[in-house]
Amino acid sequence: MDSEDLKLEALFRSEPVLDDGFSVRIVSRVRRRMWVRRLSLPTAFAIGAIIAAKPLAQLVSLVPKLVSIVPQNLMSVFDWQLGGMFQGTTITLGIMLFAALLMIWRMLEE
């Protein structure tokens, strides 16, 4: 380096700003908020799943009773649709689960 570079460097050199730990507190606060944002959606999802488990089980147990109420001649008309409905439900559930996993993965990357 020549003398002009050294003079210029000395001109721009300054003492570090004393902030009494302010920047450390800000960084820790920002990191804490990031973790809260990362964990809030999976936590809400888990709590919602726990709350919905009992009514969902009751609803599933009511399906055979509802099918027995429907007249048999009406059931024979819709028999071909009921056979394919369970496969469609499985596919829909798989797509929804895959989408939820992608959302959680994307959230964890941030």
Image (cartoon, rainbow, N blue to C red):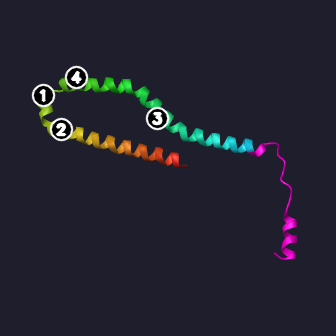
Which stretch is magenta? 1-23
Considering the numbered disc 4 on the image, is that residue within a helix, a strand or a loop?
helix
- Front residue of 106/4: it is 4
If you read the primary sequence from the N terminus, does the residue marked by circle 2 or circle 4 appear first?
A: 4
Q: Which residue is mark 2?
A: 83
Q: Residues within 10 Å of mark 3 (few under 14, many from 20)?
A: few
Q: With 33 as the anchor, is 74 left or right in this view? A: left
**Cα–Cα gap, marks 1 and 2:** 15 Å
Q: Position of residue 73 (x, y in %)?
A: 11, 30
* Amino acid carrying mark 3 in the image: Phe
Q: Residues within 10 Å of mark 2 (few under 14, many from 20)?
A: few
Please tell me whether mark 3 or mark 2 is closer to you in this view.
3
Considering the numbered disc 1 on the image, is that residue within a helix, a strand or a loop?
helix
Q: Residues within 10 Å of mark 1 (few under 14, many from 20)?
A: few
**Cα–Cα gap, marks 4 and 3:** 30 Å
Q: Which residue is mark 3?
A: 45
Considering the numbered disc 3 on the image, is that residue within a helix, a strand or a loop?
helix
The relative height of residue 70 versus residue 21 in the rendered view (above or below) is above
